[in-house]
Image: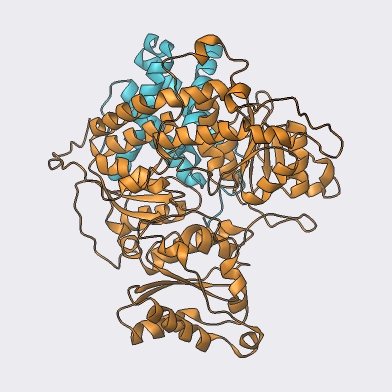
Chain colours: A orange, B cyan
Amino acid sequence: MPYHEFECSKCIPERKKHAVIKGPGEDLTSALPLGYLNTIPGSISERGCAYCGAKHVIGTPMKDVIHMSHGPVGCTYDTWQTKRYISDNDNFQLKYTYATDMKEKHIIFGAEKLLKQNIIEAFKAFPDNKRMTLYQTCASALIGDDINAVAQEVMEEMPEVDIFVCNSPGFGGPSQSGGHHKINIAWINQKVGNVEPQITSDYVINYVGEYNIQGDQEVMQDYFKRMGIQVLSTFTGNGSYDDLRSMHRAHLNVLECARSAEYICNELRVRYGTPRLDIDGFGFEPLSASLRKVGLFFGIEDRAQAIIDEETARWKPELDWYKERLKGKKVCLWPGGSKLWHWAHAIHEEMGVEVVSVYSKFGHQGDFEKGIARCEEGALAIDDPNELEGLEAMEMLKPDIIFTGKRPGEVAKKIRVPYLNAHAYHNGPWKGYEGWVRFARDIYNAIYSPLHQLAFVDISKDEIPTNAGFVTQKMLSDVNLSEEITSSDSLREYTGKYDIISQLRGKTYPQFPPAPQQLAVV
Amino acid sequence: MEDMMKDRIEQLVDYIMKKCLWQFHSRSWDREKQNEGILTKTMQLLCDEPVDLGTPTDKVYWVDAVCLADAFKSRYSWLATMDKAEIKLLMRGLKDRMDYLTITGSLNAELTDPHY
């Protein structure tokens, strides 16, 4: 087993099994780190908690819901406001955040009365909103507040409202992934099957594991609508509470982000027989394959192919402009979640960058299997790295850029490694054909930023050059390219608009004739 | 001959590992069904045999199988030189290798966890 031991973690020998380097000829039977275990005592972790996983990752992207945390106000604030899970209802879920504001006296005497009072107050303050998700936190779970009973009491007194209870306190798992599990199962147990939807198409899907970061969901929904597919619900980015109660009526679950959402897909498969199809939404080739697969399932492959042809012709020359300038650049792909495998192969093949390391803070071993399978030899895979390990890895690998969250991202900047926010993006959406070009553009801008060049000047000892003129990005990126590439007529820089999402809202879509009878055997 | 078959199987494995996701469902029983369902249907498509689409599950297996069969045919020209018996042998070897890499030889300690 090609475990990698960090110098800084030699005093914590258990950490050795949490990092591997994929060696020549090695496969998943010889190169796989441990993952999703309790954090080793003495080792600092950057993980989120189970409450964070349930509320901030899975629950709160639901757009038309009052998301109430039963606990201290700090629980509500922490980790929010940095996600960009936008919505088409004026970002209601991003504008407001709610907590019962538990204090010491509530810990001593109980907080159920406080909770009921807060729920009613919130519904009165937002009279147009009749849906609420109630999240347990460590504080209220430890004293045993019965939030299910309180929710039931309020629903009996206010029959027009509906409340979903999520019991996922911070200590409910080794990491935020435990919270993903809990909210998935709670939702299907409590809410799925409670609403009968209006079916408007012969082809109906749930789009699962998509959180609408900067509009990703709306880009994908546009493709599905262009194919004549009804997206019954999105779990949970830009998703509506009542649509998500009708998930049982879909013909197919299209799953993008295992593992944070595969639980609900598996349960829908067992309870309702709805099949699960795993897709990739990032990268021209993976996205094209995904649209084709959904098209094949419904017998409308030609509609998918029309979109693939149109979008590829429009955007490929722009992707290739960036690819020429990004070839060979080394990247630490440390997104912490599913982008570990969504991007590992696609950015290598379609943008030419070398993925020298992958990591996940809360990923299961299954997540690492996918990531390592898609990486090239020599890549360092790390489970739950702490800050020192991260620094040591970057000093060893010398990446040109890192894709990660804002905490490790800020650390990387201090050692002069440019970073892109893999969680909330810089100038997304990055999903879809145009989005993938925007991602390439953001990578290009980060690596070749003239401003970043100044970061390599140590003002404590280096002379500040005063004889150099202004250097543009192209002067940095094109210096070693051939004339054939720099003067190419077929390649061009990104030509899209700053905002590509607003135009999708209110767009009209083609009507298609009813589906023909399906054959049982081909 | 045996070495050539082994080399070809590894080429197909490499494609699946890099481009597909269906082989990595989170439990052993699920991986067994996925490998069996999709690779059997891929073999049937490559051998021009009928494929059962009777259930929604058959249909999702078939979807992945169609994409896999198309990719194999377009990328690996040696496939066109093989007769049906050889293709069946190749696909049996591929299924065994995938079962080993993702199930029996896997280091993923969660595969047999009774919970998700």
Q: Give the vertical position of B40 relative to A256 (above or below).
A: above
Q: Is residue A20 left or right of residue A326?
A: right
Q: Nearer the viewer, residue A107 or A352?
A: A352
Q: Give the vertical position of A503 relative to A309 (above or below).
A: below
Q: Whole-percent x and y of residue A77?
A: 58, 67
Q: Whole-percent x and y of residue A462?
A: 84, 33
Q: Is residue A18 left or right of residue A52?
A: right
How many marks on residues?
0
Q: Is residue B92 left or right of residue A407?
A: left
Q: Is residue A411 left or right of residue A375?
A: right
Q: Give the vertical position of A206 relative to A141 (above or below).
A: above
Q: Whole-percent x and y of residue A479?
A: 62, 17
Residue A376 in sight:
yes
Residue drawn at x 35%, y 56% as measured from the top left: A88
Q: Give the quadrant of residue B33.
A: top left
Residue drawn at x 71%, y 41% as measured from the top left: A19
Residue A1 in sight:
no
Q: Give the quadrant of residue A75.
A: bottom right
Q: Nearer the viewer, residue A148 or A469?
A: A469
Q: Nearer the viewer, residue A222 or A385?
A: A222
Q: Whole-percent x and y of residue B46?
A: 34, 21
Q: Give the quadrant of residue A353.
A: top right
Residue drawn at x 21%, y 43% as measured from the top left: A509
Residue drawn at x 80%, y 41% as measured from the top left: A6
